[in-house]
Every structure is written in structure tokens, then in C-alpha cells.
Image: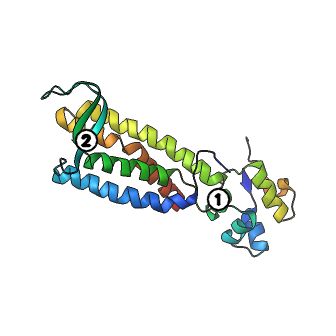
């Protein structure tokens, strides 16, 4: 699964650490999600999407074959 | 994510304070062959069936034993459990996944190393491997978890 978190983070001028604090997770989690190494739970995905005021589908995308 | 098996982050530092000196003392004891008869006290033995040099065989005996090695082993195990199974400052689902993956990795790696030792190491040296193997699952887990966390 791919995501636009890095782009949205830049748009809102947030560092990984800032976003992590706002969501209440570790900075490592945000980094791993951005790099596609970790697929977040639905709960975390919705929290991030709500913070950016976007539908989850605009932030997270399925890759081909998924 | 909350796990019912994890204890508070407050135990992390006490854990390191037990594990670090415990490991150091354990390595010193093995390499320098300390006299383990210091700290000799009477201990309760639930069962002793292999005493070659005395008649101390049977259930529920009071034996005299140097307890330095027991103390060191308990420091390593208790310290390792506290370090390995106390929460991180920020405990979330990704950290939980790292911990779970590290545990699986540590158990598999531990038994691969043990199989290698079973095949290639014999006699008294193998006994030493068994002693190390009391601690290596915890140690491999802690090392792996901290490496993955630092890399993430």
C-alpha cells in the first residue's frame, strides 16, 4: 500500500516528529509508514487522514495486485 | 497498542542496571573461573539425583552451595525480562510489531545457533553452550529489537 503522507506533511509544514506527536505515535512509526515498510491499522490510517482533513482513500492507495 | 504482557516503561532503567552488571559478572565468572564457593550458604534443593561425591541424593534436601552464579543468572534473567518486556516511552502498534517480529527472529536464530552447536561442539564445551543458551533467547531478542528500532 502506498500513501501521500510525506506530501501532505510537507503541505502542512510538519516534520515526522510533529506528526507523530499530533497523532500520538512514535516518530519511527511515521517514518516506517511513509517508506511503505509498515501498513498502519485502520484506526491509525483514519486518525492521520482526519488530521489532514482528507478521506482515507486520498491518503492511502492500494498498489496493483493488492 | 496495549499489550497485557508489557510492564511500565519505568522498569526499563532498573532492567538495564541488572542486565548490564549481570552480563559483565557472568562473563568474568566464565573467563576468569571465579571461585563459586564464595557466598556459600545453605539452600533448599527440591531434587538432587546426580551427586557423585556424597550421599546428598533425594527430594527436599538442604545443601550447601555457592550462590554467586545463581545471583548472576537471576540478575541477567530478571534484567533481561524487564528490558525486553517493558513498554517504550511511546508504545504504539508499529513498536509492538517490531517487538513481535524480533521475538520470532530471536527464537529461530537461537535454535539455528543451538543446532549448529549440537552438531559441531562436543564434551564439556557443549555444556558451556547450554549455559549460554539459558540467556541467548532473551539477549538475541533485546539486541534485534533495539537494532530494528534504531534503524526505523
Residue at the spot of label 2: B42
Between marks 1 and 2 in the image, the one whose residue lies nearer the viewer: 2
Position of residue B130 measured from the top left corner of the image (x, y, whole percent)? 29, 37
* Rendered location of residue B12, percent (x, y): 50, 59
Q: Is residue B9 left or right of residue B37?
A: right
Question: Do the residues under discs 1 and 2 have CB atoms within 8 angstroms?
Answer: no
Q: Which residue is mark 1?
A: A29
Which residue lies at the image location 33% right of the left edge and 47% below the top edge?
B73
Residue, x 73% and y 73% (percent of image)? A14
Relative to B133, residue B33 above or below = below
Picture coordinates of residue B3, whole percent (x, y): 64, 47
Q: Is residue B27 visible?
A: yes
Disc 2, SS: strand
In this view, B22 is above or below B132: below
The chain ID associated with circle 2 is B
Of residues B56 and A58, which is closer to you in this image? B56
Q: Is label 1 in a helix, a strand or a loop?
A: helix
Q: In the picture provided, is B89 more to the left or to the right than B21?
A: right
Badge 1 and badge 2 in a common chain: no
Quarter containing the C terminus of chain B:
bottom right
- C-alpha span from label 1 to label 2: 51 Å
User: Which residue lies most toward the bottom here?
Assistant: A13
Q: Is residue A37 visible?
A: no
Toward the left, the furthest residue is B53
Q: Callout 1: few (<14), some (14-19), or many (20+) C-alpha neighbours within 10 Å?
A: many
- Is B147 displayed left or right of A49 in the figure? left
Closer to us: B48 or B24: B48
Amino acid at each position: 500500500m502506498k500513501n501521500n503522507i510525506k506530501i501532505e506533511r510537507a503541505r502542512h509544514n510538519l516534520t515526522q516528529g510533529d506528526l507523530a506527536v499530533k497523532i500520538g505515535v512514535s516518530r519511527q512509526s511515521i517514518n516506517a509508514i511513509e517508506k511503505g515498510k509498515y501498513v498502519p491499522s485502520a484506526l491509525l490510517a483514519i486518525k492521520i487522514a482526519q488530521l489532514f482533513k482528507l478521506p482515507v482513500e486520498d491518503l492511502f492507495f492500494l498498489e496493483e495486485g493488492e | 497498542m496495549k499489550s497485557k504482557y508489557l510492564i511500565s516503561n519505568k522498569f526499563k532503567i532498573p532492567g538495564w542496571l541488572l542486565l548490564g552488571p549481570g552480563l559483565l559478572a557472568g562473563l568474568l565468572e566464565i573467563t576468569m573461573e571465579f571461585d563459586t564457593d564464595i557466598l556459600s550458604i545453605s539452600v533448599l534443593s527440591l531434587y538432587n539425583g546426580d551427586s557423585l561425591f556424597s550421599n546428598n541424593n533425594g527430594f527436599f534436601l538442604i545443601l550447601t552451595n555457592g550462590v554467586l552464579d545463581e545471583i548472576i543468572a537471576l540478575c541477567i534473567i530478571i534484567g533481561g525480562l524487564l528490558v525486553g518486556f517493558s513498554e517504550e516511552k511511546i508504545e504504539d502498534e508499529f513498536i509492538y510489531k517490531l517487538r513481535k517480529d524480533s521475538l520470532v527472529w530471536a527464537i529461530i536464530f537461537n535454535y539455528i545457533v543451538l543446532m549448529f552447536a549440537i552438531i559441531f561442539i562436543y564434551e564439556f564445551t557443549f555444556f558451556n553452550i547450554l549455559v549460554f543458551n539459558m540467556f541467548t533467547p532473551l539477549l538475541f531478542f533485546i539486541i534485534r529489537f533495539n537494532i530494528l528500532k534504531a534503524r526505523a
